[in-house]
Amino acid sequence: MHIEDLLRTLAPQVLGVLARKNGQFDACEDAVQEALLEAALQWPHDMPRDPKAWLTAVANRRLVDMWRSESARRAREERVSAMDADHSYQSAPEADDTLTLMFLCCHPALSAPSQLALTLRAVGGLTTAEIASAFLVPEATMGQRISRAKQGIQKAGATFSMPPPAERKVRLGVVLHVLYLIFNEGYAASSGSSLQREDLTTEAIRLTRLLVAAVPSEPEATGLLALMLLTDSRRPARAMADGTPVPLAEQDRSLWNRGQIDEGIALLSSVLGRRAAGPYQLQAAIAAVHSEASSHDQTDWPQILALYTVLEALAPSPVVTLNRAVAMAMVNGPAAGLELLAGLDDALGRSHRLHAVRAHLHEMAGSFPEARAAFLDAARKTRSLQERRYLLGKAAKLDSTGP
C-alpha cells in the first residue's frame, strides 16, 4: 500500500481514537491533519513499525500543544496533565471507530450539506477541492462550509458515541450519501493522473459492509452495498495498461469480477420487494441489468430507461437526468437523448460529464463537428488527466476522419 493510501485509511481511525478520548472534534481533526502532514514528510525516509500508533501519538502531542497555546486556564491544564505523560499509544483496539465517527459528523445540529462535507473530509479523506467538485461549488465556499461544520459539532456538545437507534435512523440517509460520494470519487476520480482510486472504492465498500452489519434491517444500506459491488466489478476492464479509459460499450466483460457481481445481485435480491425500492436499490438494479448482459448490444436498454424514469421521479437530480438521456438515446435514438440534455446546462454546465455525453450522442447522430466541439469542451473542464487525454483523442479522431 502506498503511503498516501495508508494515511487516508488511518486518518479516520486516528481521529476516532482522539475524539473518543478527548472530545473537541474540531481540535482533534486539526491535530490529525498536522500529524498527517508530518507523516507525509517523514515516512518516505523512516517508516514506523506501527504507523497507526505513531500517528496517534503525534496527533495527541499536537492537540496538547494547541490546548496549551490557546489557554492557560486551570480546567484545561488539569485536563492536559491528566493525559498520558509520555503520550505513548499502543495500537488501537480491534473495534473500528470509523462508523461512529461518520454518525458524529452527521449530527442533526448541522445542515445536510455541512454533514456531507464534514464526513467526506474527516472519514473519506477527500480534499476540499475534491469535495467542492462533488458538490459543484467553488473550493473557497466548501472550505468555509467545512470550517463552520467543525465548529457546529463543538457547539452542539456532541459526544463520540453511536447515537441511539431512533436518532441513528434519522442520520442514516446522510451516512449513506457520504459513502456513495466516497465510492464515486474513487470509481471516477475528479482529478489527478489516475482514472480511478482503488483506495477510496475499497474503503467505501468496507465501511458500507460495517454499516449493513450495524443496520441489517435497512434495505437501502444493503442496496448501496450491492450497487458498489456491481459497479466496482467493472474496474479491471475500465482502463488500458497506460490508464486510458475504456468506455462501457468497449469493455472486455470477461474481465469483470464475477464474484462481486454474484454477491451484488444476491444482496439486491434479498431486499427488493421488502418495501418500496429506494434510490440505491434502483441504481443497483440498473447496474445489475448491465452486469447480466453478455455484451453491450445485448443490454436491456428499455428496462434501464424504465428504471431511470422511476429513479428520476423518486429522487430527481441533474445527474439522473443525464444518465436517463443516455438510456433514452439507446432506446429512441440520439436526438431524443440530446433533447433531454438541453435543459441541463444551468445545473451541469461546469461539469465535463454533460459535455462528454453530448459529444457521444452527437457522434451517434453523425453530427461530427458538434461532437468534436463538445469533446473539446469536456476536455477543457475535466481535472482528470486520463479523461482529458481520452477526450482530446476522440476530438482529434473526429477532426481527421469526420466530414
Image (cartoon, rainbow, N blue to C red):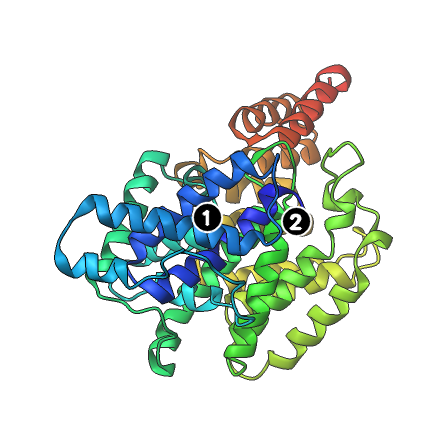
Q: Which mark is residue 207?
A: none
Proximity of marks 2 and 1: CB atoms separated by less than 8 Å:
no
Q: CA distance from mark 2 to mark 1?
A: 26 Å
Residue 184 pos. (x, y %): 56, 50
Q: Quadrant of the C terminus?
A: top right
Q: Secondary structure at mark 1?
A: helix
> What residue sits right under mark 2 in the picture?
198
Q: Quadrant of residue 316?
A: bottom left
20 shown above or below 295:
below
Q: Residue at left 24%, top 53%?
A: 151
Label 1 environment density (alpha carbons within 10 Å; few <14, some 14–19, many ≥20): some
Residue 128 pos. (x, y %): 41, 40
Q: Residue at left 69%, top 61%?
A: 230
Label 2 environment density (alpha carbons within 10 Å; few <14, some 14–19, many ≥20): some
33 shown above or below 52:
above
Left or right placement of residue 174 versus residue 294 in this view: left
| Amino acid of disc 2 | Glu
Q: From this viewpoint, which residue is outermost toward the left?
A: 73
Q: Residue at left 51%, top 78%?
A: 214
> What residue sits right under mark 1 in the picture?
318
Left or right placement of residue 165 versus residue 55 in this view: left
Left or right placement of residue 290 versus residue 346 in this view: right
112 shown above or below 140:
below
Residue 131 pos. (x, y %): 43, 44
| Amino acid of disc 1 | Pro
